[in-house]
Image (cartoon, helix red, strand yellow):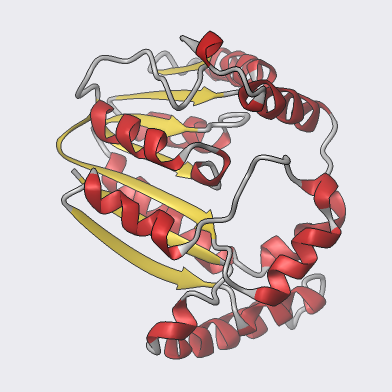
Amino acid sequence: MAQERYDDGRIERERDFHNERYQNEVRGGVWKFYRAIDDCMDDHRQAVKEASRGRDVLEYGCGRGTKSLELAPICKSIVGIDISDVAAGNANEEAARRGLGNAHFMAMNAEEMNFPDGSFDIVFGSAIIHHLDISRAYAEIARVLRPGGQAIFVEPLGHNLAINSFRNRTPALRTPDEHPLLRPDIELARQYFRDIDLKFYGLTNLASAFVHDTPLFRPALAALGAVDQILFTIPPLRWQAWYVLIRLSR
């Protein structure tokens, strides 16, 4: 990794934040709001699982490797990278404990990966691109994908004023360098990928967070999620979503 060429401290700040996070989680008090996008995460998980069977897969920003470890039994091979050496080390220990010889994890700069061109059929990640220099990230993801390969990500969006107000009041929950994606950030992907498919989540169904620990949660999430998908047929409302599922085809 040629991390030395970065002189603004961004990479080091990200590494330090995530090393601390994987030792002492800082978001415990707000996880109920992430439950409100369970439908988004479920769709992402299913899409990645369907695409990964029998393939060489890269998890881009693997954290503790939980998703990769679940996928390993159906993949040809799976590699996870993360800026946090603590997270990668924990993931390797768990892979060894489970006897998963086709799963490997390493600390690596996602903007300058050490893999040869065309190493993977599938690249996937969750809430990682918005931590990065977006053009470098797209270029690297496209580079390591084989022709016909897919990248599948879920990422937060940055257009909703109410959500942005919450972000501004809770700076300790995120790094100073991350930036929820804006529409031009997503459109930039067209310079690197043949096709882009988007599905939006998280508008009225954020209200389900307030009943997350009651029997009403699942029915509320399903009902409000259905309302959201109707609302997202109106183009301007799509960009008021909290999260987007992004599929990029090489």
Residue 216 visible in the snapshot: yes
Residue 217, x across and y down, in percent? 71, 78
- Quarter of the rendering containing residue 245: bottom left
Report whether 208 appears left or right of 198: right
Which residue is more in the foreground, 214 or 62? 62
Above/below status of 164 relative to 104: below
Q: Is residue 47 left or right of residue 207?
A: left
| Residue depicted at 42% across the width and 49% down the height | 153
Residue 164 in the image, given as x and y percentages of width and height: 70, 66
- Against 204, is 97 above or below? above
Q: Nearer the viewer, residue 129 or 84?
A: 129
The image shows residue 129 at horizontal and vertical percentages of 49, 43
Q: Is residue 160 left or right of residue 78?
A: right
**Residue beneath the point at 44% across and 84% down:** 236
Q: Quadrant of residue 143?
A: top left
Counting labels gives 0
